[in-house]
Image: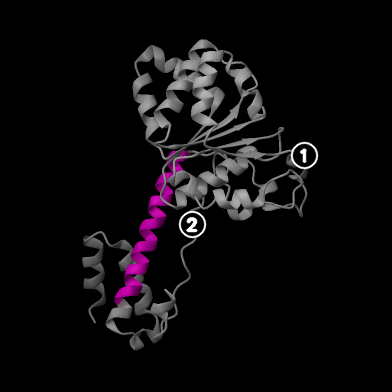
């Protein structure tokens, strides 16, 4: 078989995954036992896996999340009141498909931001677009955008992502401009996209930190009524970071210089007559 011309054609067509798979299969002695349909199915699997990884890489890069977190690494043994069935339900991403919201509240250090990033990572793996913002910095960016003409463009960008993560809300009371900015954000996303907010402040006190009764009613009505709530408690997990036997969640702290890890591709299929069914 003319291996090299075939690979060149696949690369020329942009089928880099199939080209990679073609090379791998050619080096496997058992490949001669495969039918043409099984061979093709394996090549398509290589191509689909590579494209999925590329989409994930692009989405996770754009999301710019604070932690490299994964739902598989969540430590359910930590005493912080994490509702495991609820979190597993959220990790299925059905709430994003239904355009519902989520809030994660609790004292500092119990993993609110980490859990939010884990859900964001899972959303990226299932081809949802995600954006992560710390609320103090987002409000500062919006304040600058008011003066340089980028405000409308920035709001459009925020409104288009499937999941918007707003991290670390409070405890400062919002000013007039921040209240109106937040109302614009939640109005654009209401029943159209999902919102995930983390805060040290319990949901029942959000009304107070908004600081205006009329706008508070409008904002919270669009956030809270269809939101899942995760309410955490307990001591800070940061005290366990240096513990050599601590969980992976404890040890994974912010690392701006490290690239997020893409989802692992499926193991190379067995190259026999049964491999097509297993793939």
Please indicate, yes or no, whether residue 21 appears anywhere in the rendered image.
Answer: yes
Query: Residue 24 is drawn in which quadrant?
Result: bottom left
Main SS of residues in magenta: helix
* Residue 12 percent coordinates (x, y): 21, 61
Judged from the image, the secondary structure of the residue bearing numbered disc 1 is loop
- Name the residue at 39% across, 28% down: 188
Residue under label 2, please give it: 263
* Residue 249 horizontal side relative to residue 260, left or right: right
Q: How is the image coloured?
A: one colour
* Residue 87 percent coordinates (x, y): 61, 49
Please indicate, yes or no, whether residue 158 appears anywhere in the rendered image.
Answer: no
Residue 10 colored magenta? no
Quadrant containing the C terminus in the rendered view: bottom left
Query: Residue 191 is drawn in which quadrant?
Result: top left
* Residue 7 percent coordinates (x, y): 26, 69
Residue farthest toward the bottom in the current orientation of the protein: 33
Q: Nearer the viewer, residue 200 or 249?
A: 200
Q: Nearer the viewer, residue 18 or 179?
A: 179
Q: Residues within 10 Å of mark 1 (few under 14, many from 20)?
A: some
- Looking at the image, tell me whether mark 1 or mark 2 is earlier in sequence order: 1
Residue 234 numbered mark, or none: 1
Judged from the image, the secondary structure of the residue bearing numbered disc 2 is loop
- In this picture, which residue range is highlighted in magenta? 40-63
Residue 203's place in the image compared with 216, above or below, is below
Q: Nearer the viewer, residue 218 or 116?
A: 218
- Name the residue at 70% across, 47% down: 250
* Residue 256 horizontal side relative to residue 129, left or right: right
* Residue 249 percent coordinates (x, y): 66, 49
Q: Residues within 10 Å of mark 2 (few under 14, many from 20)?
A: some
- Name the residue at 36% across, 77% down: 25
Residue 25's place in the image compared with 51, above or below, is below
């Amino acid at each position: 078989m003319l291996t090299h011309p075939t690979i060149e054609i696949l690369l020329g067509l942009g089928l880099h995954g199939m080209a990679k798979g073609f090379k791998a299969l050619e080096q496997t002695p058992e490949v001669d036992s495969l039918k043409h349909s099984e061979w093709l199915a394996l090549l398509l699997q290589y191509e689909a896996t590579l494209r999925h990884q590329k989409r994930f890489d692009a989405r996770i890069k754009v999301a710019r999340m604070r932690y490299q977190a994964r739902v598989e690494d969540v430590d359910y043994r930590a005493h912080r009141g994490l509702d495991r069935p609820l979190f597993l339900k959220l990790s299925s991403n059905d709430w994003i498909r239904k355009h519902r919201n989520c809030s994660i509240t609790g004292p500092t250090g119990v993993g609110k931001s980490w859990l939010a990033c884990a859900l964001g990572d899972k959303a990226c793996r299932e081809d949802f677009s995600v954006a992560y913002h710390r609320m103090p910095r987002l409000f500062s960016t919006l304040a600058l955008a008011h003066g340089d003409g980028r405000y409308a463009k920035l709001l459009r960008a925020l409104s288009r992502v499937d999941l918007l993560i707003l991290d670390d809300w409070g405890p400062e009371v919002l000013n007039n401009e921040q209240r109106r900015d937040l109302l614009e954000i939640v109005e654009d996303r209401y029943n159209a996209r999902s919102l995930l907010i983390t805060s040290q402040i319990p949901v029942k006190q959000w009304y107070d930190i908004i600081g205006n009764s009329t706008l508070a009613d409008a904002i919270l009505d669009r956030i809270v009524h269809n939101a899942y709530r995760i309410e955490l408690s307990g001591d800070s997990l940061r005290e366990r970071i240096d513990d050599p036997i601590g969980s992976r969640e404890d040890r994974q702290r912010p690392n701006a210089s490290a690239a997020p890890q893409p989802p692992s591709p499926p193991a190379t299929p067995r190259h026999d007559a049964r491999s097509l069914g297993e793939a």
